[in-house]
Amino acid sequence: MIARPSEPPSAGTVADAERGHWADTLLPRAVRPYARLARWERPIGWWLLLWPCWWSAALAADAAGRPWPKPLHLALFMIGAIAMRGAGCTWNDLVDRDIDAAVARTRSRPIPSGQVSIRAAWAFLGLQALVGLVVLVQFDRFTIVLCLSSLGIVAIYPFMKRITDWPQAFLGLAFSWGALVGWSAALQRLDVAPVVLYLGCILWTIGYDTIYAHQDKEDDAIVGVRSTARFFAGATRRWLVGLYGAAILCHAGAFALAGVGLLAWIGLAGFALHLAWQVIRLDIDDPDACLALFRANRWAGWILFAGLVADGLRRL
């Protein structure tokens, strides 16, 4: 539905935010709008950004004969994912503030509702980017350059929903970059295996974000926002079979190129079963079910990561 100009925002609330989260209960009231702007109450976003990094780091460790990925790298990737996901959300909300003001689920977000000014949002974006930069300079020069080369994709992503039915593909290009970075940070180079893993992560991202986008398809049609959810429509399940199936094949190719052992393959099998479960349970006309399936991808990530780590540990 379209918001009526006379409708005032509900002060201090965001319609699509998590209720009872620590960001809304423990933080000072003045900070809470910024927490919502960065989506701190919705950790699934940074988990999905983090998983390609951790998968790639674990895959590189396994390929190099190490028992586990470097704990410091895993910690840096997590801090970086939280900071840069928040920066990305802030940038997206700055670009989309007019669209958000016209959509029921998003018009109470901090910028369109006036809880955070445009100037303050830009300052907060810069602060989060600075945290990301501090994390970035802990790595080698090759990895730093590799990370910086993704900024163009991140910058153009919010505009893609205006010009293509495939904005989820551009999200995949940005969110999956960690599949290259995790390997680079571990081995100071790129090989074919992380590139194939990157392709698989892009396909996985298109799939899960299509499920997410089905929540907003009616409002998106009204305001002219394009998405794979609207493009696939009633054929979404068949598209997901293809996207998820191709993602699993790419992951298998990366595993084969890296020479992983049995436990990693068992993890990949569990990952595949989880994606199959998502396809079976999908109901594109139930927004709550779509959101639950989207969030379930955090556990899909854990399954694949656990298999890779277990495969490395067998060397002990």
Image (tube, grey):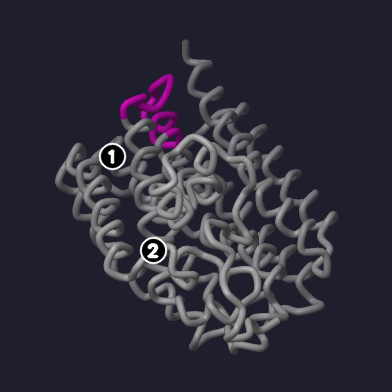
Q: Secondary structure at mark 1?
A: helix
Identified at 79% across, 56% down, the residue is 289
Task: Determine whether the residue tagged by mark 2 lies in a helix, strand or loop.
Answer: loop
User: Between disc 2 and disc 1, whose residue precedes?
Assistant: 2
- Distance Cα–Cα, label 2 vs label 1: 36 Å
- Left or right: 268, with 31 as reference point: right
Density class for disc 2 (Cα within 10 Å; few <14, some 14-19, many ≥20) is some
Front in this rendered view, residue 276 or 32:
32
- Residue 54 at x, y = what percent? 45, 38
Tell which residue pokes out farthest to the left in this image. Answer: 141
Q: Is-magenta flag for residue 175?
A: no
Q: Which residue is mark 2?
A: 116
Q: Is residue 59 magenta?
A: yes
Magenta part of the chain: 58-72
Disc 2 and disc 1 in contact, CB within 8 angstroms = no
* Residue at the limit of the structure toward the top, as seen here: 316
The picture places residue 68, in percent across and down from the top left corner, at: 42, 23
Image location (x, y in percent) of residue 24? 53, 43
Whether residue 197 appears in this view of the structure is: no
Q: Can residue 137 be seen from the camera position used here? A: yes
Residue sitting at x 60%, y 54%:
17
Seen at 64% across and 63% down, the residue is 207
